[in-house]
Image (cartoon, rainbow, N blue to C red):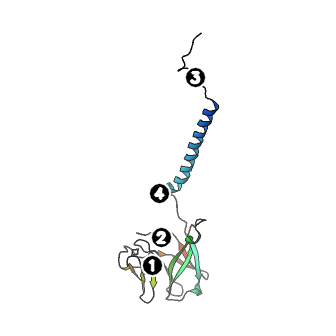
């Protein structure tokens, strides 16, 4: 009869070791799935695969706007998250140029993103953060903003005025 030394004898795994191995593998699998779920949207965004939808949002009826006046209008983001609440709302400065023409400016300053205000008496947009000033046509008048105010496309659909929502870049 050949005797196997204890170090070479097959190790018997009891139920405790098997359960531990199972739990380790389950933990690794669930962690990997969780990490993938978190990373995938970021990777898709970085690769440019994730597109923000563009949606025409109604901001009022034609009769709500006087020719020549610039007013603040609120509308919902193109892709609001279910839990966003009021933060899904955004605004624009909308001017009725004539009977059939509107122009809409982003309220976000192109310097560092503060909300700009329309000063009708001065015919200027002013940014309170660092003194940025924009002319009525959105061009930079003075201060640090590097670019004009962004604009949204506007259309008249039957009797409704609609803004095409989209992400607004800042510098
Ligand atoms: S954020 Fe508007 S001037 Fe700086």
> Does the CB distance between marks 4 and 1 fall below 8 Å?
no
Q: Position of residue 90 (x, y in %)?
A: 53, 74
Q: Which residue is mark 4?
A: 46
Q: Nearer the viewer, mark 2 or mark 1?
A: 1
What is the tally of numbered marks visible in this picture? 4
Question: SS at mark 3?
Answer: loop
* Picture layout, residue 95 above or below residue 55: below
Mark 4 beta carbon near ligand 1 (under 8 Å): no
Q: Which residue is mark 1?
A: 116
Question: SS at mark 4?
Answer: helix
Question: SS at mark 2?
Answer: loop
Q: Earlier in the sequence, mark 4 or mark 1?
A: 4
Q: Earlier in the sequence, mark 3 or mark 1?
A: 3
Q: Earlier in the sequence, mark 3 or mark 2?
A: 3
* Picture layout, residue 135 above or below residue 146: below
Q: Is residue 144 left or right of residue 169?
A: left
Label 2 and label 1: CA atoms lie apart by 14 Å
Residue at position x 54%, y 85% from top?
100
Label 3 and label 2: CA atoms lie apart by 66 Å
Q: Earlier in the sequence, mark 3 or mark 4?
A: 3
Residue at position x 60%, y 36% from top?
20
Q: Position of residue 48 (x, y in %)?
A: 48, 59
Bin the neighbour count of mark 1 within 10 Å (Cα to Cα): few under 14, some 14-19, many 20 and up. many
Query: Which residue of the protein is positioned furthest toward the top in this rendering?
Result: 1
On residue 168, the disc is 2
On residue 33, the disc is none
Mark 1 beta carbon near ligand 1 (under 8 Å): yes
Question: For this rendering, which residue is in front, 162 or 115?
Answer: 115
Query: Which residue of the protein is positioned furthest toward the right in this rendering?
Result: 15
Question: SS at mark 1?
Answer: loop
Q: Which residue is mark 3?
A: 10
């Amino acid at each position: 009869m050949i005797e196997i030394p204890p170090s070479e004898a097959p190790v018997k795994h009891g139920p405790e070791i098997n359960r531990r191995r199972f739990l380790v593998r389950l933990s690794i699998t669930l962690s990997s799935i969780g990490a993938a779920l978190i990373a995938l949207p970021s990777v898709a965004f970085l690769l440019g695969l994730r597109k923000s939808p563009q949606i025409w949002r109604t901001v009022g009826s034609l009769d709500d706007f006087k020719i020549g006046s610039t007013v603040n209008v609120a509308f919902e983001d193109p892709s609001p998250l279910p839990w966003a609440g009021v933060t899904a709302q955004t605004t624009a400065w909308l001017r009725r140029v004539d009977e059939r023409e509107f122009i809409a400016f982003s309220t976000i300053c192109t310097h560092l993103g503060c909300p700009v205000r329309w000063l009708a008496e001065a015919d200027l947009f002013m940014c309170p953060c660092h003194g940025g000033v924009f002319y009525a046509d959105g061009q930079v008048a003075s201060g640090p903003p590097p670019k004009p105010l962004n604009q949204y496309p506007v259309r008249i659909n039957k009797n409704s005025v609609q803004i095409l929502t989209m992400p607004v870049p800042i510098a």
